[in-house]
Image (cartoon, rainbow, N blue to C red):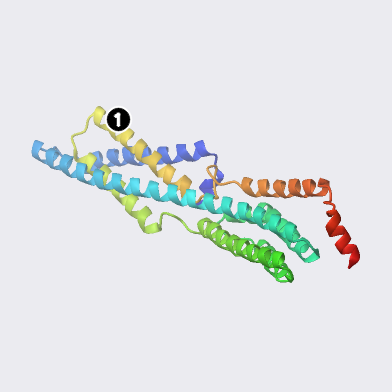
């Protein structure tokens, strides 16, 4: 079913609604042809009562599924945004730390963010992760391990650097987990489809009329729209309604802006007393 995410949003929605309405009306026609019988008022009342119960249960399942995919989508978006934000904080800490080893770690973060955008994001649309991006992420840890704090200031910064690096790892795992897992498991999809089928069968038992057919079509169209919403949000990194790597692009722009501002920042002159003390030494 992943191929459906390649269609534009409106095309996929039309397909879901058309399939649901077509199935409902075709089923009604087949029922009238092969199971035609004149129901009594008692049987119609019984069918209406059962239809109300089954429709209520189906509505609850649809509502729970919709809330589940919406929360999963928001969680995935929050994980991506948090990872990009923490990467920006890590870059600033490394820049303040200074030195060749810190510069190398900063460059590793930059290369990782570029790989997330160029390599990993297309793979996440298919529920996979990029091996190349994973190697670039591990390079951040390896280069950060070369930092050798000697002063109290550097020791305070190294704690922040390792804290943000590990935090990036957590957010990365959450993002990749959201890309690979479906918020709606297969068993729930099967239950939803069977519940819709049972609803249609109960409608078929009612006496046929043109109004009955129109109401069935509208009911089926509503169910199709709900199914489309659940499907569109079920994989947050696939389809037209998907999370974009905009936060990572913003993080890269922020890095470039930080580097430019740092390069233009005038060097601080030492106070006279400190300068004399330094000369005396």
Q: Quadrant of residue 162?
A: bottom right
Residue 32 horizontal/vertical position (percent)? 24, 39
Residue 238 horizontal/vertical position (percent)? 54, 49
In the rendered view, does 26 fall on the left or right side of 243?
A: left
Tell me, yes or no, if residue 255 can be seen here.
yes
Residue to which mark 1 is pinned: 214
Q: Is residue 271 above or below residue 226?
A: below
In the rendered view, does 51 fall on the left or right side of 185?
A: left
Q: Residues within 10 Å of mark 1 (few under 14, many from 20)?
A: few
Judging depth in this view, the residue of 276 and 263 nearest the camera is: 276
Which structural element holds mark 1? helix
Q: Quadrant of residue 40?
A: top left
User: Which residue sits at x=29%, y=35%?
Assistant: 216
Residue at the top extreme, as displayed: 211
Residue 117 horizontal/vertical position (percent)? 66, 52
Count the marks.
Answer: 1
User: Which residue sits at x=84%, y=51%?
Assistant: 267
Judging depth in this view, the residue of 132 and 226 nearest the camera is: 132
Tell me, yes or no, if residue 135 can be seen here.
no
User: Which residue sits at x=34%, y=45%?
Assistant: 63
User: Which residue sits at x=67%, y=56%?
Assistant: 119
């Amino acid at each position: 079913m992943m191929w459906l995410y390649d269609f534009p949003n409106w095309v996929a929605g039309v397909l879901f609604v058309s399939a649901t309405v077509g199935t409902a009306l075709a089923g009604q026609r087949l029922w009238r042809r092969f199971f035609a019988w004149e129901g009594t008022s008692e049987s119609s009342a019984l069918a209406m009562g059962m239809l109300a119960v089954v429709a209520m249960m189906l509505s609850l399942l649809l509502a729970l599924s919709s809330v589940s995919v919406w929360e999963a989508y928001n969680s995935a978006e929050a994980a991506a945004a948090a990872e990009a934000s923490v990467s920006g904080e890590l870059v600033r800490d490394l820049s303040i730390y200074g030195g060749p080893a810190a510069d190398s770690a900063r460059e590793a973060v930059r290369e990782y963010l570029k790989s997330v955008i160029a390599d990993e994001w297309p793979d996440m649309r298919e529920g996979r992760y990029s091996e190349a991006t994973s190697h670039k992420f591990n390079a951040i840890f390896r280069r950060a391990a070369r930092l050798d704090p000697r002063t109290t200031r550097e020791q305070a910064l190294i704690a922040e650097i390792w804290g943000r690096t590990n935090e990036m790892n957590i957010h990365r795992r959450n993002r990749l987990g959201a890309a690979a897992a479906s918020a709606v498991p297969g068993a729930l999809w099967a239950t939803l489809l069977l519940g819709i089928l049972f609803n249609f069968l109960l409608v078929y038992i009612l006496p046929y009329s043109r109004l009955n057919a129109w109401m069935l079509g509208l009911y089926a169209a509503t169910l199709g729209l709900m199914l489309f919403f659940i499907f569109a949000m079920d994989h947050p990194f696939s389809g037209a309604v998907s999370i974009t790597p905009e936060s990572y692009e913003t993080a890269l722009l922020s890095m470039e802006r930080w580097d430019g501002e740092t390069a233009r920042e005038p060097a601080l002159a030492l106070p006279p007393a400190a300068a004399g003390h330094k000369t005396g030494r």
